[in-house]
Amino acid sequence: MTLAGGHKDIKGGVKWIGTEGWVWVDRGGFDASNPAWKQGKHLARELRKVKLYTSSDHQQNFLDCVRTRQATVTPVEVGHNSAIPGHLCHIAMLTGRKIRWDAKEEKIIDDAEASKLMTREYRGPWKMS
């Protein structure tokens, strides 16, 4: 199974495809289907739905924010919602099936085997109640 590489159109990062076009991003930059979105190195601030401050070192940003109690460059909700599609794609690849997702409940619909891959066994004495 090839996750990335081996073809010029497959590259690292993530590609988000929506009703108005697509945006591909990685830690080094981005590309987009709409030329207006590609003006400059970063997406214009007024076009961003989530407005984050700039960080050149995410690990240091996290440590600094633990010390100062300031918000990290990426709010936890943004990080969580950005990770979900990748996790679901991985589960779909592992099961060999399409995944139906209930975004409101954050649950896989009608696939018990795929749903099991959403978590792992906890080490004692930890458990989810």
Image: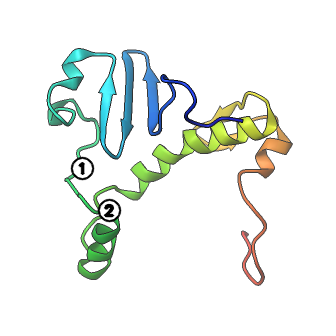
- Residue assigned mark 1: 52
Q: Residue furthest front?
A: 6
- State the residue at coordinates (42%, 15%): 19
Task: Identify the residue at image location x=32%, y=78%.
Answer: 66
- Residue 128 vs 84, above or below: the answer is below
Task: Answer whether labels 1 and 2 touch (C-beta < 8 Å).
Answer: no
Q: Position of residue 104 (x, y in %)?
A: 57, 40
Badge 2, how many Cα within 10 Å: few under 14, some, many 20+?
A: few
Quarter of the figure with the C terminus: bottom right
> 32 and 115: which one is in front?
32
**Rendering coords of residue 8 (x, y %):** 48, 23
In front of the other: 64 or 77:
64
Position of residue 47 in the picture relative to residue 6 (left or right)? left
Is 42 placed left or right of 125 in the picture?
left
112 lies above or below 32: below
Q: Quadrant of the N terminus?
A: top right
Question: SS for tag 2?
Answer: helix
Residue type at tag 2: His
> What amino acid is at disc 1?
Leu
Q: Nearer the viewer, residue 66 or 55?
A: 55
The span from disc 1 to disc 2 (Cα, nearest Å) is 12 Å
Tell me residue 49's x, y (percent). Answer: 28, 36
Q: Quadrant of residue 58?
A: bottom left
Identify the residue at image location x=46%, y=36%: 14
Q: In this figure, which colouring scheme has been used for the structure?
A: rainbow
What residue is rendered at 33% in x and 55% in y?
A: 74
Residue 3 picture location, percent across and down: 62, 37
Viewer-side label of 1, 2: 2
Query: Which residue has dot 2 on it?
Result: 58
